[in-house]
Amino acid sequence: MSEEKIEKETHMNPFLQPYNTPHDTVPFDRIRISDYEEAFMEGIRRDNEEIDKIVNDPAEPTFDNTIIRVDVSKGEHYYDLLDRVSNVFSCMLSAETNDELDALAQKMSPILTQHENDVILNKKLFDRYRYVYEHHRKLTPEEQTLLEKGYEGFVRSGALLDEKGKEKLRKLTEEANMLSLQFSQNLLKENKAFTLHITDREQLDGLPESAREAAAQAAKEKGLEGWVFTLDFPSYSPFMTYSTQRELRKKMYMARNTVCTHDNKENNIEICKKLINLRRELAQLLGYETYADYVLKQRMASNVKNVYKLLYDLIDAYKPTAIEEVKEIERTAQKAEGEDFEVEPWDLSFYSHQLKMEKYNLDAEMLRPYFELSQVIQGVFGLAHRLYGITFKENKDIPVYHPDVKAYEVFDKDGSYLAVFYADFHPRKGKQGGAWMTEFQGQYIDYKKRNVRPHVSVVMNLTKPTDEKPALLTLGEVETFLHEFGHSLHGMFANTRFGSLSGTNVWWDFVELPSQFMENYAVEKDFLRTFAFHYKTKEPIPDELIDRIRQSRNFMAAYSCLRQVSFGLLDMAYYTQKDKFNEDIISFEKKAWKDAIITKQLPNTCMTVQFSHIMAGGYAAGYYSYKWAEVLDADAFSVFKKNGIFDQKTAQSFRDNILSKGGTEHPMTLYKRFRGQEPTIDALLERNGIKRELSAGEAKKA
C-alpha cells in the first residue's frame, strides 16, 4: 500500500477532533480541502440534533432552557462545529483561496443558506422564543439584549410570515448569498488578471526605488524580465503617484476602474442589479418600504432621514474646501504643463503629490525608511501595552495558513492569557485586496463557565519586502495597520457572557469606532518617536519631519471626506429603491453621487461592480457608518487629547465601557458611559481644519 493511500485512510478530519494545539488554535497544517465539506455537513447535523432537543423539551420555555441553550450550549461538545469550520473557511476564501475552494464555496452556499433558513424559520423554536419574550424572569441588561436580539432576529428573518412568504424568503436569501459569493470571486479574478509589464527602463521614469524593486520582484516571481505592476494597492498607488508616463497612468487607472465591466464571465453588472432587487424584495416581504429602512431599524442612525442628514451636513461643511483643493491641484498641473492642460482622473494623484511636495516638502517615500514593518509591529504593540498594559509574544508553534502570517499570544496586564492574534501582511495571488479583521474563534462563557478567549486575525495588503530591502511602509499603510488593529482590540478585549454579543458583534455604524479611533495615533509625535527609526542608520525620525506630517495631515482632507460621502450616497441610492431597479448601473452611479463629486466623471468607469462593501461585505445600506463612526472617533479621541494620549485611566474607561462590552447594550448607552455625553460633529471639523457657519441658535449662545 502506498504511503499516500495509508495517509488517506488514516487521516482524521481535524475539525472533528480536539485540536491539541496551543490555545486550541486552528491546525492549518492538518486541514485538507476535503475536510471542510465533511465538517460542514456534520456541523449541520449537530445543529439540527441540538435544536430538536430544545424544541421538544416538555418543560415550559424559559430564558435558561431555550435562549441560553441556543447561544451557549454546545451539547456534548465544547465547541460549535459549524462556527468552527465556517470561520476558517470564510477566511481562506478571502485570504488564501484557489479554484478548488471557490468551487466548494459555490457548492456549499445554498446548503448553508438552507440550514440557516431552517433554523430561523423553525416555528417551534420561534414559538419558544416568543413565549420567553413575553413571559421571562427578571433579566440582566446583557440577558435582555440577547433575548431581544434573538427575538428580533427571528422576526426580521421572516418568522411571522406565512408558509408562502417563508418559501419566498428562502429563495431570496439563497440567491442573494450565491450572487454575493460570485461577485467576490469575479472581482478577485479580474483584479489578479491585469498586469502592466514594462521592459523599457525609461518607462519607469519618476518611480521611486521602492516601487521599482517591488515591480522587479513581481516580474521575477512570474518568470518575466523587467518590471510588473498590478492592481494591488502597494503596486498601483505608487505608480499613479509618481510615474511621469501619463499614458501608462491612464492604462492603470482605466484597468482598475473598469474591472468587472468587461464582456466576459467576470462582469458584475447584472449581479449588482439582481442583488439590489433581491434585497429590496426581501425588505418588502418583511413589511419595509426599502432595504435601507429594514437595515437601519437596527443602527444608531435609526432611519434614512438621519443618514442623509449626516451625509449632506458633511457635504455642506466640506465641499467648498474640497473644490478649492481640486482647483489648487489643477493650477499646479497647469503651471507645469501649460494653461490649456486638462487634468484627468489619472492625473490627480500625480499632481496632488507635486502640490504636497511644494507646500510641505513631504513625500511618502521620505517616510518609508522609518516605517520598516517589524518596527511598526513593535510600535503598534507598544501602543497597546502603553494604553492597556497588554503584551504580545510570537509563538511559532501556533500553526498558520501561509508563511506571511505571524501568530502571537496576547497577555493581559496581570500576565494572564488574553487572546491569540494573527497578522497576515502582504498581497498574493489567492488574496482579496483591501484589509480586514476576522475571528477564528470568538469570546464567550461556555456551559462549564469557562471564559473562552478569542483568536482574532487582521489581513492586509501592505508593501512586500524585496531581495534588497525589508518591507518599508507608507504612512497610509501604518494607518491601515492601526485601523485593523483597533478592530482586533475590540475582539481581544471581549469579555461578555454570550458569543453572539461579544467583540465586534455590534451595530454596523458603531463597529468602526475602535478602528478609526486608533488611526488618530498615526500622526502623534509621542507615538511616532517610540518606533519610527531609520531601518539602516537607526536614527529616529526627525522632529521637523514629524512636524511636516502634522502640518500636512489635512492635505486634501475635504476631498477625501467627499469621496467617502459619495460612496455613502451611492449605497443609499441603491438601497432606498422602492420599485424594481432596471436602470443602467454605470449611468445611475454617476447621478447617485453627483452632489459629492467635484472631479471629472468618465463614462465607462464604474465603482459599483467592485464595491465589495455594499454588494458582498455586509455594508449594504451601511457604508455611511464610516463617516458616522468618524464623528464618534474624533469625539472620543478629544478626551485622550485632553487627558493625555497615553492616559491609562482614560484608556481603561474606553476598554471597560466600549471595547470589552461588545453589543451587550445599545451603542449610544455605552458611548455616553465613556464620554459622559452624546458626540457632536465639532471635534471632527476641528481635526480636519474645517470651519462651519454657526446656526442662529448657536450664534446666540456663543
Image (cartoon, rainbow, N blue to C red):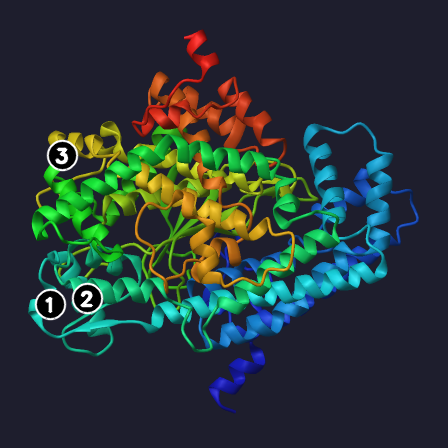
Provide the secondary structure element on which disc 2 rests. helix
Q: Between 645 and 605, which is closer to the camera in this rendering?
A: 605
Vertical placement of residue 675 versus 531, above or below: above
How far from the left and from the top, in percent, is residue 391? 38, 37
Which amino acid type is marked by label 1? Gln
Q: Between 689 and 340, which is closer to the camera in this rendering?
A: 340
Judged from this view, the residue extending furthest toward the top is: 701
Which amino acid type is marked by label 2? Leu
Earlier-in-chain disc, 2 versus 1: 1
Please give the residue where the numbered disc 1 appears in the rendered image.
Answer: 203
Q: Are marks 2 and 1 in contact (CB under 8 Å)?
A: yes
Q: Is residue 278 shown to the viewer in this render?
A: yes
Please give the residue where the numbered disc 2 appears in the rendered image.
Answer: 248
Which amino acid type is marked by label 3? Leu
Q: Examine the image and state in which quarter residue 383 appears.
A: top left
Query: Within 10 angstroms of label 3, few (less than 14), some, or many (20 or more) residues?
Result: some
Earlier-in-chain disc, 1 versus 3: 1
How far from the left and from the top, in percent, is residue 86? 58, 60
Rounded to the nearest angstrom, the CA distance separating label 3 from label 2 is 32 Å
Q: Are marks 1 and 3 in contact (CB under 8 Å)?
A: no
Q: Between 694 and 56, which is closer to the camera in this rendering?
A: 694
How far from the left and from the top, in percent, is residue 638? 38, 22
Please give the residue where the numbered disc 3 appears in the rendered image.
Answer: 545
